[in-house]
Amino acid sequence: MSERSHHDMGGEAAGKVERAEHDYAEWERRVDALMVLVSGVKGPALMTVDELRKNIEALPPDAYDRLSYYERWVTSITKSLADRGVVSEQELKNKEAQGRYRPLTPYQLMETSLRELLVEKGYVTDEQVDAEVAEMRSRSPERGARVVARAWADAEFRQRLLEDGTRACQALGLSVPALKLIVVENTPQVHNAIVCTLCSCYPRMLLGIPPDWYKSRSYRSRMVREPRAVLAEFGLKLSENIEVRVHDSTADMRYMVLPMQPEGTEGWSEDRLAALVTRDCMIGVAVPAAT
């Protein structure tokens, strides 16, 4: 059996899940946008998502732990593009030298230098980056809540959603590009939750950028080891007779939880139902309640 890599945290011991969150800085959003634009999703295929992950996973353990989420990303994207010859290390050094006067951290400078080089070489435009950042801001849990509300109100749609989440969402005009979306349904006997033990795979097209805690060592480590304890830290204490199923996402497969509809909400409009559905309900660390 091969040795476990440092980034593979599933089942490892860890501390309490810290639920603090922050809004992403513009440079972080631009890193995300660059990944979309250079990986063939909305622009030239200059690298692959597998390369992104490989170079993140190849970071030394101390660097992996020290760097923030998007610091890892920009480091990996830069290395991937340099390995392919899209940009050279000398070009990057020259561009960074030109920008050292700016009040930027080393990783903000890396993002700025890489982006400016890609624009100069004609691979992307500033307008494309801005448009992708704007699209990123528009992706929020309200999209997923619309899907859940439709499933609660329309039994036929609910069945289609459980059979093929990708096609069902596309029927609502919600794009799920190049991914298999699996929707898992909570019942009185089964409670579902999602995690990504290797990185941060998550139904971003429906829920937006994953919260900090979803990407944390504690959540990724413990959710598959002691899910009831983790759920209790979120304030969700389940009866022992309810089975807890934890689903580990992958690079090309995403999970979303279809929570149970609260009692007393039958016949409500979809808008009213959607207002009950939070992001955490669709991750599985909370349940909706009628208000």
Image: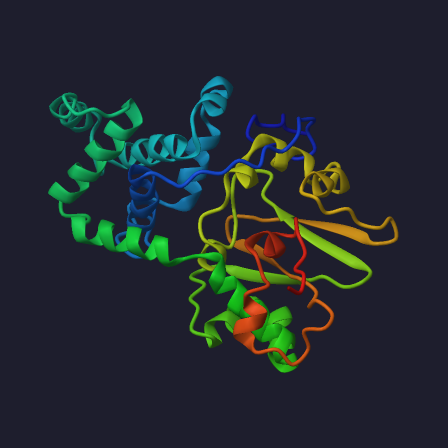
Instruction: Say left or right for 113 vs 216.
Output: left
Farthest residue to the front: give it: 291
The image shows residue 160 at horizontal and vertical percentages of 61, 76
What's the residue at 33%, 50% (across, down)? Answer: 36
Instruction: Say left or right for 211 vs 31.
Output: right
Q: Specify the quadrant that holds the C terminus.
A: bottom right
Residue 230 visible in the snapshot: yes
Instruction: Say left or right for 290 vs 134.
Output: right
Residue 164 visible in the snapshot: no
Instruction: Say left or right for 126 vs 19.
Output: left
What's the residue at 45%, 53% (across, down)? Answer: 208
Tally of marks: 0
Q: Nearer the viewer, residue 45 or 111?
A: 111
Rendered position, 108 above or below 191: above
Q: Specify the quadrant that holds the N terminus.
A: top right
What's the residue at 49%, 46% (across, down)? Answer: 210
The image shows residue 17 at horizontal and vertical percentages of 63, 33
The image shows residue 93 at horizontal and vertical percentages of 18, 23
Farthest residue to the right: give it: 241
Rendered position, 44 above or below 199: below
